[in-house]
Amino acid sequence: MLLNLIITSSKASALTYDEAVKLWEESRFDAEFGEYMGEFAQYNNYHKLDTRNGCFELGEGPTEIFFEITNDGASNHYRISRAIHKEQSDRLSCFKESYLGVPVKQPPFMPFVFKMEFN
């Protein structure tokens, strides 16, 4: 029963692409957002999240994904839990696989959405 409630709650709060863009636009110039993303960039580079699965070789041109960080509601464990995008491709699927489920530190506010563009 508890699992069902968590799944239902998670589905109810899923962001649309337009909502993700709006949240990102509203927060991307916030000082706390910038600080958090600077730390995330270091984490990303250290763990080579963008290169570990060979995603860049799967296509050309920009690949844009908005990621949402959430927690499981039962603990203080935060993860990249959703990928929000307009188009679908093998390259995009590969980047989603590289990032979804990655544990991260608690963001400065929720909901927390950030944009990644892979060129």
Image: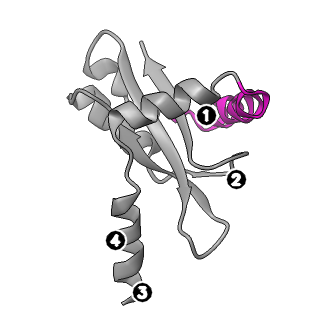
Mark 2 secondary-structure assignment: loop
3, above or below 117, in the image = below
Q: Which quarter of the picture shows residue 32?
A: top right
Q: What residue is pinned by disc 2? A: 106
Residue 31 is covered by the magenta coloring: yes
Instruction: For marks 4 and 2, give the one nearer the viewer.
Output: 4
Q: How many marks?
A: 4
Residue occupying the far top of the picture: 61
Give x and y (percent) for residue 8: 34, 71
Q: What residue is pinned by disc 4? A: 8
Local packing at callout 3 (Cα closer than 10 Å; few below 14, some 14-19, many 20+) is few
Assess whether mark 1 and mark 3 are in contact (beta carbons under 8 angstroms): no
CA gap between label 3 and label 2 equals: 24 Å
Instruction: For marks 3 and 2, give the one nearer the viewer.
Output: 3
Q: Is residue 35 among the parts visible in the rendering?
A: yes
CA gap between label 3 and label 4 equals: 10 Å
Q: Is residue 53 among the parts visible in the rendering?
A: no
Mark 3 secondary-structure assignment: helix
Mark 4 secondary-structure assignment: helix
CA gap between label 1 and label 4 equals: 31 Å
Q: Which residues are magenta?
A: 30-50
- Counting residues from the N terminus, which is met first, the one under dot 4 or under dot 2? 4
Kind of residue at disc 4:
Thr
Q: What residue is pinned by disc 3? A: 2
